[in-house]
Image (cartoon, helix red, strand yellow):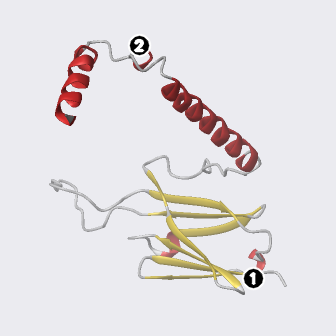
């Protein structure tokens, strides 16, 4: 019995499935109230997310890349931000960067991390590079600090390609 019902439904909708026009609004389901309910639900969800984004992210400061950063290839710094109770700890991966090439600044409660890597001195002119996977260029990351962060007492440490920034909380 189930097989017969399934085959009947399959054969009834076969021309729709084989049709070259795949516009869903022209499907036999376009006038189906359940289908229309799903379309309204999708439209409502889209509006809800748009309103959420406007309400919660409209006043967020989006830092711009500084103009003086190298115009070559740039990569965003991968970071972890952890609330350690008395302070915030930010760990940033900066592989292959010399300590002297790292700049950490705070301006208007926005923390920025800039770093540059250069080609190795081992590369000689005339060498034919077969494959190069190591990143050469600049890194940049900026983020708003929490209102209770005290960047004046910030400390930094760079070890094994990882920059650790500790920012105490205001008391």
Residue 138 position, x and y percent, is: 47, 57
Q: Residue at x 48, y 27 (%)?
A: 35
> How many neighbours does mark 1 have within 10 angstroms: few (below 14), some (14-19), or many (20 or more)?
few
Q: Is residue 44 above or below residue 102?
A: above
Residue with the most extreme right position:
171
Which quarter of the figure is the N terminus placed in? top left
- The disc at residue 43 is none
Give the Cα separation between the discs numbered 1 and 2: 64 Å
Comes first in the chain, label 1 or label 2: 2
For the residue labelled by badge 2, is the local secondary structure a helix, a strand or a loop?
helix
* Residue annotated with mark 2: 26
Decide which of 78, 10 is in the foreground and name it. 10
Q: Is residue 90 above or below residue 5?
A: below
Residue 46 position, x and y percent, is: 60, 36
Q: Is residue 99 above or below residue 23?
A: below
Decide which of 129, 148 is in the foreground and name it. 148
> How many neighbours does mark 2 have within 10 angstroms: few (below 14), some (14-19), or many (20 or more)?
few
* Residue annotated with mark 1: 153
- Left or right placement of residue 98 versus residue 82 in this view: left
Are dots 1 and 2 in contact, CB under 8 Å? no
> Looking at the rendering, which quadrant does residue 110 occupy?
bottom right
Residue 72 position, x and y percent, is: 44, 48
Which quarter of the figure is the C terminus placed in? bottom right
Q: Nearer the viewer, mark 1 or mark 2?
A: 2
Q: Residue at x 75, y 82 (%)?
A: 153
- Left or right placement of residue 3 versus residue 17 in this view: left
For the residue labelled by badge 1, is the local secondary structure a helix, a strand or a loop?
helix
């Amino acid at each position: 019995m189930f097989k017969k019902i399934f085959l009947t439904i399959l054969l009834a909708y076969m021309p729709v499935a084989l049709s070259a026009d795949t516009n869903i609004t022209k499907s036999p389901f376009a006038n189906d109230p359940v289908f229309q309910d799903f379309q309204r639900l999708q439209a409502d969800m889209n509006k809800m997310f748009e309103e959420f984004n406007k309400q919660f992210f409209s006043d967020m400061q989006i830092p711009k890349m500084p103009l003086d950063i190298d115009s070559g290839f740039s990569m965003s710094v991968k970071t972890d931000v952890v609330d350690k109770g008395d302070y915030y700890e930010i760990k940033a991966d900066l592989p292959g960067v010399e300590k002297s090439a790292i700049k950490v600044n705070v301006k208007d409660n926005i923390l920025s991390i800039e770093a540059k890597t250069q080609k190795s001195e081992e590369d000689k002119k005339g060498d034919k590079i077969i494959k190069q996977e190591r990143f050469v260029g600049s890194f940049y990351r900026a983020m708003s600090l929490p209102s209770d962060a005290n960047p004046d007492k910030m400390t930094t440490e760079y070890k094994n390609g990882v920059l650790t920034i500790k920012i105490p909380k205001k008391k």
